[in-house]
Structure formats: C-alpha cells, structure tokens
Image (cartoon, rainbow, N blue to C red):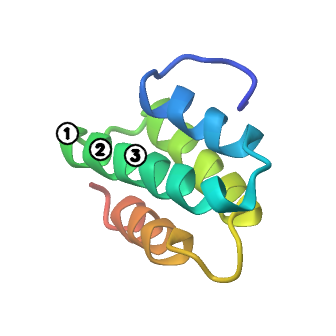
Amino acid sequence: MLDEMKFPPWQQIGSDALREIDPQLVRRRVAAAETAIFVRLQELTRTPANFELEAMDAMLAELQKHATANFLSEPTHQALKARAANGH
C-alpha cells in the first residue's frame, strides 16, 4: 500500500521520512510526516470507504517502526484509531 502514491503531499513526506537513514534527521522528518498527516486528518470527513484514512494509518504504523525510541508516533497513531472507532 505504501508503494503507491495516491495521497500526496503527506504520503510523499512520510515516504521521505521512511527512507531517511541519518539519525539526526529521522526525528525531524518523522515529525514533519506526522504533522502533515494530522493536518490532513483534520480536513477529512469519515466515510465508510475512505481509503486515505487507511493509508494514513498504514503510514503512521511504518513511521512508528522507523522512529527512534518512543518518538511522537504513538499519540498520533492512537488519535487516528480513536477517530476511526468513533466513525469520524
């Protein structure tokens, strides 16, 4: 799913973060990707077939794996799950 770029710009920013190997830049890029996803999430209305929300969830999971020691990913990921559970 992450190989397909259907939802730029947040998806491009996230992919760039996942490709980053410099530990000094990983945190900055992950934060930028999470911010881009969060901003877009605020713009969306939840519909039963909203594939962009599913793609955001997948990207956040990948960012969480890539980020260093308990960086920002978990709260953002949990907020997305809560929003989906509430039907928003």
For image coordinates 41% across by 67% down, the residue present is 85
Between 9 and 25, the residue placed more toward the observer is 25
| Quadrant housing residue 36 | top left
Residue identifier under label 2: 46
Percent x, y for residue 31? 46, 58
Percent across and percent down for residue 8 are 45, 21
Q: 56 left or right of 23?
A: left
Type of amino acid under label 3: Ile
| Numbered badge on residue 37 | 3
Name the N-terminal-most of marks 1 and 3. Answer: 3
The quadrant of the picture occupied by the N terminus is: top right
Please tell me which residue is depicted at 76% across the width and 64% down the height of the picture: 65
Assess disc 3: are there few (<14), some (14-19) or many (≥20) residues with their C-alpha within 10 Å of its C-alpha.
many
Q: Residue at x 70, y 81 (%)?
A: 69
Above-or-below relation of 77 to 1: below
- Residue 84 picture location, percent across and down: 40, 59
Estimate the spatial distance between the alpha carbons at disc 1 and disc 3, rounded to whole Å: 10 Å
Picture coordinates of residue 73, whole percent (x, y): 54, 69
Quarter of the rendering occupied by the C terminus? bottom left
Query: On the rendered structure, is 35 left or right of 73?
Result: left
- Location of mark 1 (residue): 43
